[in-house]
Amino acid sequence: MPHLLHVACIMDGNGRWARRRGLPRTDGHTAGEEALANIVRIASQRDIGWLTVYGFSTENWVRPRTEVRHILSMHKRLFGRIDELNENNVRVRWIGRQFNESGARTPAFVQRSIEKAIDDTRNNTGMTLTVAFDYGSRAELTRSARLSSDAKNLRSDVEISDITQHLYDPEMPPVDVLIRTSGESRISNFLLWQIAGAKVFFTERTWPDISATELDAAIALVEPTDGQ
Ligand code: IPE
Ligand code: IPE
Ligand code: MG
């Protein structure tokens, strides 16, 4: 059996996609959600075990309220695609500031759709789709460091394995390849711990235009022996 890859995506460029077409930014987010559903289907047919996507960052809350509201409704739509996810044998997970954590901002209606999607897909045995929502790597690592030192009582005892075990999803494997769309060659605040050693694939294409071509080009960066 081949090594099943972990592919992570920074889904950037919805706004630019819309602007180039003379459309409101919200239309870009609608198209971005559709592109994600399409990529999930394609990825589930590749040797990909984990697909992790950056849906909304801890920094994105400062955007205009109407845009934020639209992005939230797109997540509700995404997490509502239960039949499709089940057809593709995809298991849903979520990472982000835990609902009871101070500073967490995921509204209740999105929390409910996340919990329902996780529950309704938990028996699927194919690819794991993890959506990072209200997610920031710095918040994740800060929490992990705190929990690790609490668990050990002594800060100096904390080891690499402790930090890994206290991430939002300790079962998430290291990322093999990170994709960022829209011509930005930066990582922002995404999976900073998990991408150590990952290949990085930057493409000029905006997220709503992503296709199997970019996904396959990114996968091709991973050497056959990597991660085995
Ligand atoms: C990515 O597209 C979606 C989110 C960050 C939620 P953007 O909205 O950042 O699109 P650009 O970068 O303005 O083109
Ligand atoms: C990255 O996109 C975050 C998500 C895709 C959710 P941004 O557009 O927010 O990233 P920066 O701030 O330009 O790096
Ligand atoms: Mg952007």
Image (cartoon, rainbow, N blue to C red):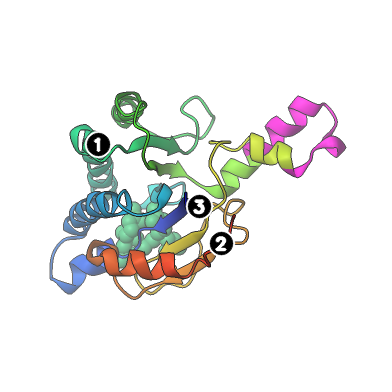
Tell me the crowding category of disc 2: few under 14, some 14 to 19, or many 20 or more residues within 10 angstroms, Cα based.
some
Is label 3 or label 2 in front?
A: 3
Front-most of residues 8 and 146: 8
Tell me the crowding category of disc 1: few under 14, some 14 to 19, or many 20 or more residues within 10 angstroms, Cα based.
some
Q: Which residue corresponds to mark 2?
A: 198
The amino acid type found where label 3 is placed reads His
Q: Residue furthest front?
A: 1
Front-most of residues 155 and 161: 161
Residue 154 coordinates in the image, percent (x, y):
85, 31
Is label 1 or label 3 in front?
A: 3
The amino acid type found where label 2 is placed reads Ala
Calculate the distance from the C-alpha at mark 1 to the C-alpha at mark 2.
30 Å
Quadrant holding the C terminus: bottom right
Calculate the distance from the C-alpha at mark 1 to the C-alpha at mark 3.
32 Å
The amino acid type found where label 1 is placed reads Lys
Would residue 162 be found to the left or right of residue 72 on screen? right
Is label 1 or label 2 in front?
A: 2
Calculate the distance from the C-alpha at mark 3 to the C-alpha at mark 2.
15 Å
Q: Say which mark, if any, is on residue 3.
A: 3
Find out whether residue 92 is within the magenta segment: no
Q: Which residues are magenta?
A: 143-160
Say which label, 3 or 2, has the lower sequence index.
3
CB atoms of marks 3 and 2 within 8 Å: no
The response on whether ligand 2 sits within 8 Å of label 2 is no
Would residue 192 be found to the left or right of residue 201 on screen? right
CB atoms of marks 1 and 3 within 8 Å: no
Residue 116 coordinates in the image, percent (x, y):
30, 25
Residue at image point 42% right, 35% down:
105
Residue at image point 40% right, 53% down:
47
